[in-house]
Amino acid sequence: MNTNAPLAIVAGAGPRLGRALVQRFQKGGYHSVGLSRTGQNDGSGDTNLIQCDLTDPEAVATVAKRLMASCGAPKVVVHNPAKLVISPFEKTSAEDFETTWRSMVLSAVLVANQFLPAMAAGDGGSFLVSGATASLRGAKNFSAFASAKAGLRGLTQSLARKYSTGGIHVAQVILDGILDTSASRSLHDLDPARMMDTNDVAEAYWQLAYQPQSTWTHELDLRPMGETF
Amino acid sequence: MNTNAPLAIVAGAGPRLGRALVQRFQKGGYHSVGLSRTGQNDGSGDTNLIQCDLTDPEAVATVAKRLMASCGAPKVVVHNPAKLVISPFEKTSAEDFETTWRSMVLSAVLVANQFLPAMAAGDGGSFLVSGATASLRGAKNFSAFASAKAGLRGLTQSLARKYSTGGIHVAQVILDGILDTSASRSLHDLDPARMMDTNDVAEAYWQLAYQPQSTWTHELDLRPMGETF
Amino acid sequence: MNTNAPLAIVAGAGPRLGRALVQRFQKGGYHSVGLSRTGQNDGSGDTNLIQCDLTDPEAVATVAKRLMASCGAPKVVVHNPAKLVISPFEKTSAEDFETTWRSMVLSAVLVANQFLPAMAAGDGGSFLVSGATASLRGAKNFSAFASAKAGLRGLTQSLARKYSTGGIHVAQVILDGILDTSASRSLHDLDPARMMDTNDVAEAYWQLAYQPQSTWTHELDLRPMGETF
Amino acid sequence: MNTNAPLAIVAGAGPRLGRALVQRFQKGGYHSVGLSRTGQNDGSGDTNLIQCDLTDPEAVATVAKRLMASCGAPKVVVHNPAKLVISPFEKTSAEDFETTWRSMVLSAVLVANQFLPAMAAGDGGSFLVSGATASLRGAKNFSAFASAKAGLRGLTQSLARKYSTGGIHVAQVILDGILDTSASRSLHDLDPARMMDTNDVAEAYWQLAYQPQSTWTHELDLRPMGETF
């Protein structure tokens, strides 16, 4: 482990966008670590993953302390857990709401709690959050997902205002389209050219993390060409 | 109890706006019931209150079944619990986030679950939700409150789209100002003429509940004259 | 003419919503006057109309001075000219853009210029502006219309902030649906139950004009039940 | 003139952001041309400028035809005229409104008319529009500016939806802060570290122009660290 390399943490490093993000920062010279529920690379094998239940305060604290003990405060943190629930409201249980909230909002609180004060006390950095169309709009069968993503957006805005003066760029990315993954190719009857390439998306996060302090973006919408909006 | 009168339920009937809402619908000929944590009128004594922990699925189900057994499906439901937390993020605990979420989002899920299907199966009606400035904007020291209110907004939008075709008008009110209450008079150094009169606010909910189906408002901003926005 | 009655002016009193607005304020006891390009009642005959080209500074000034000389400053002004252009951008000429801008933005400037200072110097009142879906969103074949309506929205917001402390309630109504008129019945293959009744819309303006100073709405969305949004 | 280099046009190439934009695309290998009212480099001398009144249909057509005759359809067009008016509404004349509208909206119509069809018929490209805080919000003394910038935003959204399927990325940049120029340094009592560096801003436009088709941003907010929002 190169402890001189700046630390990048991707909280929520599932086999889609998460891995692409870990790899993008790795390629850019970071000590880049993904936190995921399983901690397992599924076949691809080359990403640096740590098992961590992001909804468990102690688990997040333990991993955070360990990483910061060896690498110092992170330069970049990405919050990227996705817990998509699509179902009519009457079939969406209170548990579904709680699970999506824990997965996407509580986890952001816990991750922010661990890293933002250390980043603010140090050299600042970037805290980037993955949003979705549902961050802005509660569609019909997305009650639980939209509620959680909108709640995450409110939190992110508050963090952006709080930590901006401490040199931390808190921003969210509104992913307004379908990510091109094997899962979505089999799920959606959609030309892959109309989907978002996960490497392209990761590049946009990279650019966000490198925006100079004179020109910060706080909410970045991304959608593939031709996507209705 | 006049069981011929239509039923209005105010979930979250605290000693401010909640009571004014119960009374407004009472005045309008409703069998108007407030659900509150204590179920106690504090001195004023004339509001019809039922004790109910709105974050407890069984408690909400029990009260809902009891009320609907005698009165049928409600014509109007207002969701109005307020759990204001103002604190810097680093002093806002994960429990604060969970409490505000349970208080304002989970409670809405539980109340909606109990009443919306019955209203949709019956004659429709109105489901009105109290929002705040924080529903739209996560300000610096409002991380928990903004996250919950934004999450409630996403949920409300989703419900509005889901139940609109079933004749249920789901709308939210963005209260963008300080309510004129004894509490806020002692807390804020603000001319009461710059605050919102709770009876005026209740009147706005009443008008929302009576909008004809040809002209529904889905998000109603209210602020006192002179309020910065 | 009852010069004791408060004055209501509907600038843009075409044969749809405009007439309904004039009549609603008339019914409410106002001396209610519509300004329209032709000044002609087409058959219906009972609305008080004055011919006025709202894009002509002198014409607007002349009518305004005449009305205010006999009735004093208006209590209510509604800005309601509609100039809908639907066409692909490459077939929308610069003249189309200019015409829609003059019709909907310049006219608002001229009307506001004439009446707002007098209202502010007097007892205040309401200045209500008709918006549309296009006020918020530039759809594909609505480049000229959306540009003008969005420009009108920016102007209206600025006026709201400017005159709020002077006791003038400046608000806009976002009409997000099809008005039920004979024209739209023949144009759209749409169940009239999915259209907006112009009298219902006029009632919403009336309520806006009567909001107490403690609870002002600045942007009122209206859409018929079942309208997609 | 290297006619093999792709053509970049900056319509509105004043001595601030405009020049930085021309230079950024020049540096990136473009044949980069600025259109400005004077066509004069003021001292700096190294930017390729053409005199053009962007509010004059014939002037725009003449310049466009000339440029496209030698270079083909542009790969990048930036619309960047700024006409800031700050004044109380009652001191803002109808002419001020018309001038700001011509300067910022009509010019965009004319420029879009000349280049977008050619770009759509060719290889596509990017059409980037400079917005401001006022694009989203009509502040008190910004009635004319906000009206024009909001109108430009509506137009830009409409163009984005129209030309997206033709391979043209139409996007706007919301400049939410003060540009660091000698003019603004003397005007504002503000630490330059709180201003936006025009080269940083130009870099953001460059990145927008290079977003892959799978991840297009349509509205990019930029503000300096610490800017209130």
Image (cartoon, coloured by chain):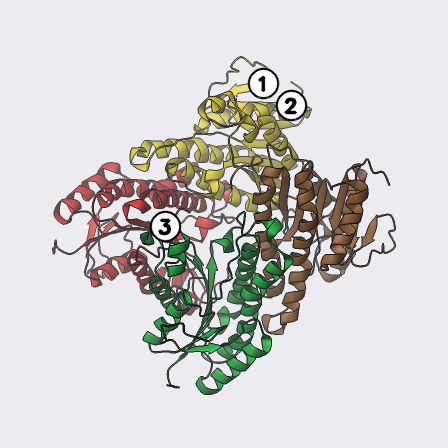
Chain colours: A brown, B green, C red, D yellow
Q: Which mark is residue D26?
A: 2
Disc 3 crowd, CA 10 A, few/some/many (<14, 14-19, 20+) = few
Contact check, label 1 and label 2, Cβ < 8 Å: yes
Is any part of residue B177 visible from this angle?
no
Residue at mark 1: chain: D
Disc 2 crowd, CA 10 A, few/some/many (<14, 14-19, 20+) = some
Query: Residue at point 20% right, 49% down?
Result: C50
- First in residue order: circle 1 vs circle 2: 2
Question: To which residue does mark 3 refer?
Answer: B190
Query: Residue at point 56% right, 74% down?
Result: B113
Residue D142 position by quadrant: top left
Residue D93 sits above or below residue B141 on the image: above
Q: Amino acid at mark 3?
A: Leu
Question: To which residue does mark 1 refer?
Answer: D47
The number of discs equals 3
Q: Horizontally, is C69 left or right of B59 in the view?
A: left
Disc 1 crowd, CA 10 A, few/some/many (<14, 14-19, 20+) = many
Question: Helix or strand or loop: what does disc 2 sit on?
Answer: helix
Q: Amino acid at mark 2?
A: Gln
Q: Horizontally, is C54 left or right of D5 in the view?
A: left
Residue D150 sits above or below residue D180 on the image: below
Q: In this rendering, which labeled residue sits more in front, label 3 or label 2?
A: 3
